[in-house]
Image (spheres, coloured by chain):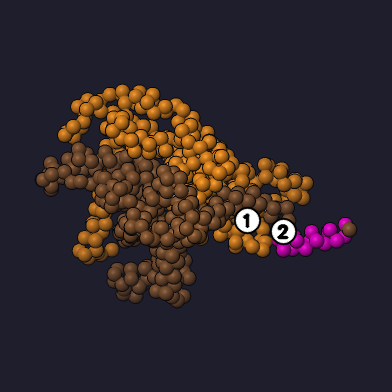
Amino acid sequence: MSVTHLTLRRRLRERGLDGVTLLVLPGVLFVLVLFIYPFIYGLVLSFQPKEGGGWLANYRKFFTEPFLYETIWLTLQIAIPATLLNTVLSVPVALRVRLMKRQKLLTTILVIPITLGTVMVADGLLTYLGPRGWLNRILLEFGISDSPLRLIHNYWGVMLSLVISGFPFTFLLTLSYVTGIDPALEQAGAMLGARSRQRFFRILLPLLAPGLAITLALAFVQAFTVFPSAILLGAPAGPTRVISIVAYQAAFEQFDYPLASAIAMLMALIQVVIIAALLGARTLVFRGPVSTGKG
Amino acid sequence: MHRSLGEKLWSFTIWAVVVFFVLNLLAMIGSVVVDSLGTHWFNTWLPAGFTPQWYVMAWEEFQLPQILLVTAEVVGAVVLISGLIGVPTAYAMARRNFPGKQAVMLLFLLPLLVPPITYGIPMATVLYQAHLAGTIWGVILANLVPTVPFVILIMIPFVEQIDPRIEAAARVFGAGMGRLFVQVLVPLLTPGILAALLLVLVRTIAMFELTFLTSGPTSQTLVVALYYAVFAAGVRSQQSIDAMAVVYMVTTLIWLLIALQFVNPTQIVTRAKQ
C-alpha cells in the first residue's frame, strides 16, 4: 500500500503536481466561483426569458426593439472614434517622449486621470466644460466663440471624457511597447540612409504593430463599456444611450435579470469579435521575422 | 545632430499637443478645487470669495465619516485578501509546470481583460441571489474579482527572479511550507508585494462599476457616493459636490503618490505582462 502510494506521489511530482502546486487552488477556485460561474449563470439565464416566449426571446427582443438594438450603433459611434483618436495620438507622442531623459514627471501627471477614474473626470468636466466653466470663459474672452459652446450633456461631453481618461491609458501602454524596441535598429536604418518617415513606416511601425493591436483592443473595450460618464456627462436618454446603460437599466430598474444577462452576453460577444479581428489583422498585415523581435 | 525644418515643426506640434492636453487636465482638476472653495462663482475667472463652508456641509450632508469608514474597510479587506490568495498562487505558478498551466493562466487573464461592467451584471445577479449584494461583503467579493488575478500576474515575475536554491537551502534546514513563506519568501518578495498591494489599493478606491453594481445604502464607497451626488446634481449645490470630489481626489492621489515610490507609472496601465 505504502509503496504504491509513494510511486503515485512520485509520478505526480514528475508531472509537476505536489504540495506547492496545490497553492494555485485558492486562486483558481476564487476565479471559478466569482467570475466563470456568474458568466455561465448569466449565459443560461439569458435563455430563460422572464416573460416566456421561447429560449431566444430575450435576444429576439433586443434585436427587434430599436430602443435596444440602436445602442450597439450609438456605442460604436462613441467608442470607435475615441479609440482611434487616442491611439493615433499616442504613437507620435510616445516616440518623442521615449527620447526624453526625465519622463517621470509627464507620466506621473498622465497617470492622474486614470487613477481618479471616470466618475471624478465626469464631475471635473461638468465644472470645467460647463457654460460658466473656464474653457468657455477662455473661448468667449478671446473671441474664439460668440456664445458658450455646449459641451456637456451631449455626445461631446462623453467623447471628451473618453479622451481625458483614455489618451493617458493608450499613451502609457504605447510608451511601454515603444521603449521595448531596441534603438540600435532605428540607428542602423538611419546609417543606411533611411529618412525619419521611412524609419517610422519601415522599422518602427512593424515592430510596434503587435503592441498597437493590443493597445487598440484594450482601448476599444474600455471605450465600448463607457458607463458613468455616459450618464453624468452625456444624454443618457438620447445620443449617448450606450449599451451598458440599457443593460444596467434592465437589471436594476426593471429587475429583468434574464434580459440584462442577454445584453451583457452580447456586449461580451461584440468585444470578443472586435478583439479577435484586431489580433487577427495584426498577423495578416505584418507577417515575417521582424514581428518576433523585441517588444 | 542636424534636423530639418520639417522635423522641428513636427516635434513642436507634438509638444503642443502634450502641453494642451496637460493644461486642460490641470484646469479640469483646478476648477473642481476652486469651485469647492468659492462662495459664489458666476461669470468671472475666480469666485467672489473663498470659504471652507462647503466642506463642512459635504461632511454632514453626504455622511462622509460613514462613507470613508466603509471605503477604508472595503479597501483594507480587498488588499489583505487579494495578497493572501494572490501571493501563494503566484508562487506556485512561477515555480511549477503542471498540465493545464496555460489554461489556468488564461483563467487569471480573463478578469483583467473583460471590462467590469460586462461581467459585473451577471456577477451582481449571482451575489443578489446569494443575499450578499448590498452588504459590505458583497462589495469586497466583487472587488476581489479583478484584484486577485492582478496580484498573481504582478507577483509571478517577482517570484521567478528569486534563486530557487535559496528555497532549497531553507528546505534542507528543515523549514516547512509555512516557515518558508514567512521567513524566506515574504522578506525577499517585499518590494513586489508592496508594489502589487499598493496598486490594488489605488485601483480599489477608484473602482466604480463593481462597487456600484453590488453596494447598498450602507455599503457605498467614496467613488459610488460621489457618483450619486453628481447624478442628483441640483438637489445639492455644485460646490458641496465638488468639495466631496476634492476629498475623493486627495484620498486617491495621496495613495497614488505613495504607490509611485515603488512602481513606475507605466505599470499602472500594463496590467499584465504578456
Chain at tag 1? B
- Asked if marks 2 and 1 touch (Cβ < 8 Å), the reply is no
Residue A11 included in the magenta stretch of the image: yes
**Quadrant of the frame with the N terminus of chain A:** bottom right
Q: Residues within 10 Å of mark 2 (few under 14, many from 20)?
A: some
* Residue A223, position as x, y percentages in the image: 37, 54
Residue A71 located left or right of residue B19: right
Seen from the viewer's position, the closer of residues A255 and A88 is A255
* Residue B30, position as x, y percentages in the image: 28, 37
Q: Image quarter for residue A201?
A: bottom left
Q: Is residue A226 above or below residue A199?
A: above
Seen from the viewer's position, the closer of residues A24 and A75 is A75
Disc 2: which residue = A17
Q: Residue at x 38, y 24 (%)?
A: B60
Q: Residues within 10 Å of mark 1 (few under 14, many from 20)?
A: many
Task: Spot the orange chain and give its letter.
Answer: B
**Kind of residue sitting beneath label 2:** Leu
**Helix, strand, or loop for circle 2?**
loop
Spatial separation of the CA atoms under disc 2 and disc 1: 11 Å
Q: Residue at x 20, y 46 (%)?
A: A150
Q: Residue at x 46, y 28 (%)?
A: B66
Residue A27 located left or right of residue A74: right
| Magenta stretch, residue numbers | A2-17
Which shade of the palette goes to chain A?
brown
Q: Residue at x 46, y 48 (%)?
A: A256
Disc 1: which residue = B93
